[in-house]
Image (cartoon, helix red, strand yellow):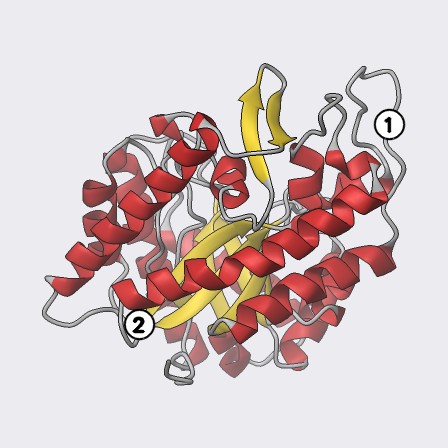
Amino acid sequence: MPDKAPPAEVTATGLGPWPGEDPLEAARIIRGELGSPHLPFLAELPARGVGSDALGRTASLLEELAVDVQPYGWRLVDRPGKDFRRAASALSTDINVLADVAGAEDASAEEIKLQLVGPLTLAAGLHLHNGERALLDYGARRDLTASLAAGVGSYLARVSAAVPGARLVVQLDEPDVAAVLAGTIPTASGYRTLRAVAASEARESWRLVMDALRAAGAAELVVSVPEVEAPFDQILHAGADGIAVPLKALTSRQWEQLAGAVEAGKRVWAGALDVAAGQLPKVADCVESVWRPWRQLGLPPSSLASLRVTPSAGLAGHSPAQATAVLGRLTQMADGLNQVALG
């Protein structure tokens, strides 16, 4: 697998969730809109149902652990059943479709991004036999992290075979990280909250999974977090190459942390395109939403090259046409920031 570094310019990518149920259409649109130097991704299509959601998709990769679906969500079980097999089958289909689409291209993209649910959110989302969250139990958390680390290698190998020579980028999704570290995840009854996970355990969990991903060929690892109370320093200390975060509600302190990360050679994936509103913001406004705080922090224009721009959230709730328009606007935004970087 090549160690080729990404281009020194602002690029665009999506967060993973995509509308519809057709992996062929999704792959064609994404790879068409996010051609080089941008970063196409393997779409997640939750509209297909059980097993195509992010949690079930990642759970299907677990080694020596299995899951099924109960009314309250995904549950760890002793042996694989139809829900587990459905999730694994959907992922295999998506990888096969990716191979067909990439193989038919005149010039395949130089990179491909995959998404996985990170170990903290996985433990918060999966349930034990008694219906309680796996997050409750230290042993369950440890086993889940080890199982995920053991299972990612075969996933990356299959994707690498589908797009030979492409640089593999992995996004670890931790939407529940702030709640896990603050101890605000509710118990099954809803009357109490689960004890906070120590920051040292979180770092070790991330490090274990990221080490496994690097050993399997991942060239870049980014952790995707919410904008509120996200532990940027802890994530970077665990070895991540960068952080993906929506920009809209970031505090001055968080911007300062991101500036420090940029100065330390880390990447920022900026969720600068707000997709919650009905109409896409203008390119100039998107560019300014990044450039203004960048300038105020004293970061040089040349350091914008550490950026990837993303939507503020996944696109599964949009129509395919709207989602396609978002990718187009992102590439326009990247072009605008590159012009700023050149002065």
The residue beneath circle 1 is 193
The N terminus lies in quadrant: bottom left
Neighbourhood count class around disc 2 (C-alpha, 10 Å): few under 14, some 14–19, many 20 upward: some
Residue occupying image coordinates x 34% and y 67%: 160
Image disc number at residue 246: none
Residue 253 at least partly seen: no
Image position of 236 with respect to 276: above or below: below
Residue occupying image coordinates x 66% and y 80%: 263
The residue beneath circle 2 is 37
Residue occupying image coordinates x 86% and y 60%: 200
Neighbourhood count class around disc 1 (C-alpha, 10 Å): few under 14, some 14–19, many 20 upward: some
Q: Earlier in the sequence, mark 2 or mark 1?
A: 2
Report whether 250 appears left or right of 317. Answer: right
Q: Position of residue 282 (x, y in %)?
A: 37, 48
Name the residue type under label 2: Pro
Q: Position of residue 30 (x, y in %)?
A: 27, 52
The kind of secondary structure element at disc 2 is loop
Q: Position of residue 171 (x, y in %)?
A: 52, 58
Snapshot quadrant of residue 222: bottom right
The kind of secondary structure element at disc 1 is loop
Q: Position of residue 135 (x, y in %)?
A: 77, 38
- Count all numbered tags in the image, as a single digit: 2
Name the residue type under label 1: Thr
Residue occupying image coordinates x 60% and y 53%: 148
Q: Residue furthest front?
A: 79
Image position of 302 with respect to 133: above or below: below
Snapshot quadrant of residue 185: top right
**Front-most of residues 12 and 247:** 12
